[in-house]
Amino acid sequence: MNHDEITRLFRDPPVLETTRLTLRKLLRQDSRDMYDYASRPEVTEYLLWQPHESEAYTRRYLNYLQSRYRAGDFHDWAVVLRENGRMIGTCGFTRFNYEANSAEIGYVLHPDVWGHGVAPEAARVVMRFGFHELRLHRIEARYILGNERSRRVMEKLGMQPEGVSREAMYVKGKYVSVATWAILEEEYHGLGV
């Protein structure tokens, strides 16, 4: 898909579902649930952003995202537990490379669900959407070295390590090294998912 097609599609992103999860557009009323995980230092330790300072900040952020959806330039879904409707994180595409027909995937989840297979479950349905609906050739993911949870998710997704960019980013007052993992369309289809 090209830039214009992606923009049109993500103005009103489709709902994606798994056995336990619904992935849908982020809503203003998600502020309490989002603040519950986004305010925690352990959640943002290996991310580019600081913990949310207040629920009012989270509300402003979600308000801002509504304008990004309207513009079609925000490609994340809210990850919601089907059993109780609780929004427990986000998963989606952080960027597209239209010339190379590839995208980067990212995810952030509440610590309550760490270690329960939720991140791979959410990322798999996003990857399936990327390869089947967007017809991507490649999906990659990156993590800051030390974030072993994220690395394990990439392994479970069938991604392959491609290397480490040493001290490639300056994040929260220090240089950090970033690892890249990826999966190609043919590899994804070879997994039989």
Image (cartoon, rainbow, N blue to C red):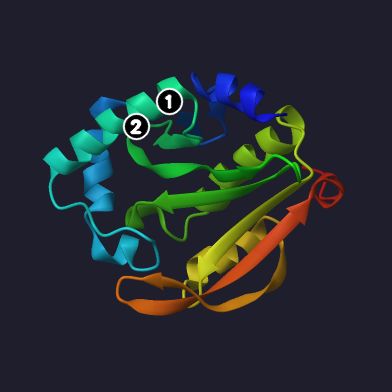
Name the one closer to the observer, 103 or 121: 103
The correct choice, above or below, for 39 with respect to 164 in the image is: above
Residue 19: x and y in percent read 56, 34
The residue pinned by badge 2 equals: 65
Residue 32 visible (yes or no): no
Residue 69: x and y in percent read 42, 25
Cβ atoms under marks 2 and 1 closer than 8 Å: yes
- Mark linked to residue 178: none
Regarding mark 2 in the picture, which secondary structure is present there?
Answer: helix
Residue located 48% across and 30% down the image: 22
Residue 66, quarter of the rendered image: top left
Residue 41 visible (yes or no): yes
159 relative to 37 in the view: left or right:
right
Regarding mark 1 in the picture, which secondary structure is present there?
Answer: helix
Name the one closer to the observer, 57 or 43: 57
The amino acid pointed to by label 1 is Tyr
Q: State the count of labels.
A: 2
Residue 167: x and y in percent read 50, 80
Residue 65, quarter of the rendered image: top left
| Quarter of the image with the N terminus in it | top right
Name the one closer to the observer, 21 or 1: 1
The amino acid pointed to by label 2 is Leu
The correct choice, above or below, for 189 with respect to 187 in the image is: above
182 relative to 86 in the view: left or right:
right
- Mark linked to residue 69: 1
Residue 162: x and y in percent read 72, 70
Residue located 12% across and 47% down the image: 54
The correct choice, above or below, for 13 with respect to 117 in the image is: above
